[in-house]
Image (cartoon, helix red, strand yellow):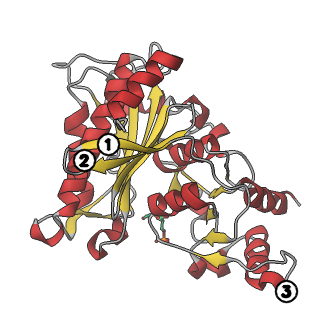
Amino acid sequence: MSRTTLSRYLIEKQREKNLLPADLRLLIEVVARACKHIAVTIGKGGLGDALGEAGSENVQGEAQKKLDVISNDILLDANEWGGHLAAMASEEMDLPRLIPNRYPHGEYLLMFDPLDGSSNIDVNVSIGTIFSVLKCPEGADLSSETAAEAAFLQPGTAQVAAGYAIYGPTTLLVLTVGDGVASFTLDREIGSFVLTQENIQIPEDTKEFAINMSNQRHWEPPVQRYVAELLQGKEGPRGKDFNMRWVASMVADVHRILTRGGIFMYPLDAKTRDKGGKLRLMYEANPMAWLVEQAGGAASTGRQRILDLQPEKLHQRVPVILGSRNEVAVVVAYHAS
Ligand code: P6P
């Protein structure tokens, strides 16, 4: 049976549904190739010299791992010369990166978290790259990196492509261009991403929840109530027992939910309230929210649909409650009552 590579999938999407202008197809293929490069670098582990702290901090004030910086550089170097981008933005960089004048400029904006789950890098737990693509608005001011931030401040509904690579027992690329969610497995022998699942659907109900329970005393009442009911199991109001998972790599937790259902929560809490939440809107919450919705799930802050949020800052944070739609609906209802 002839296998469908990522390139063939993208070309067929273009032919059938005209969803993929040539430059967007090129962008996705370049990002996928960069993710292969990141996978190889991570796979070396202690055999390379890429583990441990970089000795620097990112814009979030978080200590950077060497692999955070290396992954960011891989994505920047791969994307700057192709002529498909107007600018890029990354969790690891305070300001957007403009395309150097020596290269042609394109109409797309690429945002990424180059290596999400950094706390897991040195302990060999699955981590990933998350990316989101927007069109650059006509007439956007790209005269400086500072001025360029405004071009990125579009709601998640404006995304034209989004996805993640997960570096685990296998390396997978999970992608949507607005026509469902497909998953590609990296064939390490020939170096191609091969289509292994398409039209991924999240079960509407679940018995599995993901949250960092150590924050329990800081949660708002609706989340306190929701989780307490899950923990009461079949003797409680939910009438069934639940299971808990928390990888502390959003990519791994979301991938599990796309694969077998579940609800992922990083809600607003007393610790993160002044920052607006823990996870970043532009390159974590928005791409994951679109993937989840494209797979029949839901993604909310608890009070509103994540994809509808009008961003005000490139690195703004947001509460995230996403996954099986019927469970997200319960949490949203508790916030409303
Ligand atoms: P905590 C990783 O640092 C991350 O941004 C997400 O990938 C993950 O879901 C979350 O933070 C883990 O946060 O507070 O449990 O370490």
Picture coordinates of residue 266 (x, y %)?
59, 64
Residue 67, quarter of picture: bottom left
Q: Residues within 10 Å of mark 1 (few under 14, many from 20)?
A: many
Question: Considering only order in the chain, which callout, 2 or 3, is on the residue closer to the N terminus?
Answer: 2
Picture coordinates of residue 251 (x, y %)?
45, 58
Relative to 180, 118 lies left or right? left
For the residues labelled 1 and 2, the Cα–Cα distance comes to 9 Å
* Of labels 1 and 2, the one closer to you: 1
Question: Considering only order in the chain, which callout, 2 or 1, is on the residue closer to the N terminus?
Answer: 2
Question: Considering only order in the chain, which callout, 1 or 3, is on the residue closer to the N terminus?
Answer: 1
Q: How crowded is mark 2: few (under 14 residues within 10 Å), some or many (20 or more)?
A: many
Q: What element carries label 3?
A: helix
In the current view of this chain or complex, which residue is farthest to the front? 1
Relative to 42, 47 lies left or right? left
Residue 332, quarter of picture: bottom right
For the residues labelled 3 and 2, the Cα–Cα distance comes to 47 Å
Q: Is mark 2 on a helix, strand or loop?
A: helix
Q: How many marks?
A: 3
- Give me the disc on residue 235: 3
Q: Which amino acid does label 2 sit on?
A: Lys
- Provide the residue designation for mark 1: 193
Picture coordinates of residue 133 (x, y %)?
44, 33
- Residue at point 64% right, 63% down? 262
